[in-house]
Amino acid sequence: MNFSWDLLVNALITGIVLGGFYAATAIGITIEFGMLDIVNIAHPAFMIVGAYLAYLGWNSFGFDPFVAMVVFAPFGLFFGRAFYRAYHFFFERRGDESLQGLAFFFGVLFIIEIGLVLMFGVDYRSVPAPYAGSTLGLGLISVSWRMLIPFLVGLGMLGGIQLYLSRTFTGRTILAVAQDVEAVRLIGADPIRAKEIAFGIATASAIVAGILLIIIQPVEPSIGREYIGRTFAICVLGGMASIPGTLVAALLLRVAETLTTTFFAPSWSPAVSFGLLLVTLAFRPAGIFGR
Amino acid sequence: MSTQAAPAHEPRKSTLLPARFRSGFAIVLAGTVLVAATILVGSRVSEYYYLAAYTILQFIVLSTAWNILGGYGGYVNFGTAGFFAAGCYTTIVLNKLFQLPLLIDMSAAAAIAGLMGFGTGYLTLRLRGVFFSIATLALAIVLQTVVINWSFVGGARGVYVVRPEITGLFDSYAHFLVTLMVGLATCAVLAAWAVEKSWIGIGLAAIRDDETAAETSGVPSLRLKLIAATISGALMGMAGAPFPYYVTYIDPATAFSLAIALNSIAMPLVGGTATWWGPVVGAFMLGSVQQILTVTISSAANLFLVGVLLVVFVAAAPRGVVGIVRAWRRGHK
């Protein structure tokens, strides 16, 4: 371990920039797990589907990743709603979420991952977007657009979802469902419909996050697994249902990972998120912003 | 969750054994017969069948172990591979340091994996059930990272294990391992049966159906869950301990294999989680199908099929094969 201030400053900046991307990957879990109480461990697999959609779009139609976001995010919204309907019909309605429902998501995770392996193989795939190579220099520090774009898009997405949830009627219904499903039913709103829309938004966010991922780095099918621990760690650390909490936790986690990679060895970094998650669950399950 | 059929009173002549011990006796008898048969068959069959049988038996142990906490108590463990690998690497460490007999390795593996189950349970089982599930997933990844960075046990490169000489009743080391696995599977199933029929199993079923109601009626839920997590973890570790000798070369990717995590959940859910024989049926069915498919198609297609079967069964037949059989029987009465 050789310490230098240069390394530290660079690690901090990379950490913060990629932290914005982590927030984009975790916002779906914050909605699904934190608000709707649906333990969708297949969420990162949906994200990898997004990455492969971007790859397909680039390869077959020459879609720029931004075009891919506009084209495929509505698909995610639609698919997510249908998927939630199926989940509700088979598990939630019967009260089978805790065992069968969890196993269901686990199975879906494998079907997606191995399906992608069977279709695309285990090679890394990438989208060589034209702006990915250039960097933005600000005095002493320089950040590549490859990382800056996911940071900005991620922040935009978080802001958009926060606005939607706090300003629109449906958004507020979703927040109400997160607090008390029965109360929502009593005042005459339909909690299932609110959950369906929220799940659709979460899935669309996964597709966008996947497209951001393939801008940052090449992607192969099993990469999603690393994000199970990360996204759940961020969600729990951020206080489950809080979007600002998600952002802060994502920045913290990514800075911690970058510092580990810089000052110890990259091979230790998968343990950071899971270790942090274990420690949080053991000592402060309410998260840093929890009540 | 499960609506158990009322035990029909069957007019039996034999009164040597009380009815409640009959299944247990049957398990012991079947296990003894199978061990004897395996010893007698010896090297008269091709080694391939031993390898196939070993894999299926290993899955019987793993899915039975998973079911003790997952099926009876309703707490999903995603980290079976972590417990299994803890068993593997216990053997490797002990093998490097002392060269002990395999049975001692297995006891040590049971102790370590059991402690892991207890520890994870102690930290997270007081929270909502899903946190335990996520923690087990986390545990497996943290352990894998530790092993990758631990050069004493080979790190990411992996490590070779030399099989000791074997004499006596056994024709080859593979023969010995399969016989051992038959014994271990019998013990695991017996343990699951004992848990299911005892106060532990009844308490766990109450927890699974409604934890709050169970606690209000005086079920010591944390203690029962911890007992189940410890037994379950210990059995998984024991299943892993002989594995390095079976494959003779082991690396983190094999020991923490996803096939283990997926199968140990899919097998009990396909077989049926409410009874001790559900996981055995599931492990036997899925295990045999995979053995055939690995030879004929690819191992990726194999796992794909397991994933699809898992999803289809949890959605369409949440009580598994056992549930289907029971419904069919009831229909015919």
Image: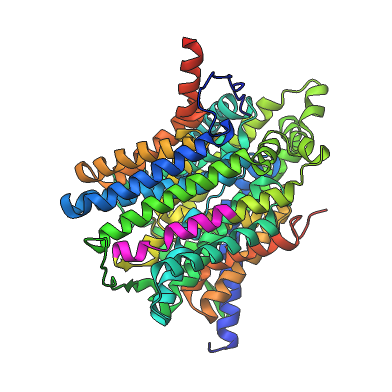
Above/below status of B104 relative to B27 = below
Please say whether residue B192 is one of the residues in the magenta stretch: no
Instruction: Tell me residue B90's x, y (percent).
Output: 46, 70
Task: Give me the residue at 54% from left, 58% from top.
Answer: B234
Task: Give me the residue at 61% from left, 71% from top.
Answer: A256
Task: Give me the residue at 52% from left, 34% from top.
Answer: B22
Instruction: Tell me residue A10's x, y (percent).
Output: 56, 77
Q: Tell me how many marks there are.
A: 0
Above/below status of B57 relative to B160 = above
Front residue of A209/B146: it is B146
Q: Can the viewer see residue A43 in this picture? A: no
Q: In the visual, does B60 lie left or right of B327?
A: left
Front residue of B188/B267: it is B188
Above/below status of B284 relative to A130 = above
Instruction: Tell me residue B59's x, y (percent).
Output: 40, 48
Query: Where, by quadrant of the figure, is residue B256 drawn?
Result: bottom left
Please say whether residue B234 is one of the residues in the magenta stretch: yes
Instruction: Tell me residue B261's x, y (percent).
Output: 46, 50
Main secondary structure of the magenta stretch = helix
Q: Can the viewer see residue A11 in this picture? A: yes
What colouring method underlies this structural image? rainbow
Q: Which residues are magenta?
A: B231-247
Task: Give me the residue at 58% from left, 76% from top.
Answer: A259
Front residue of B24/B93: it is B24
Q: In the visual, does A115 lie left or right of A247?
A: left
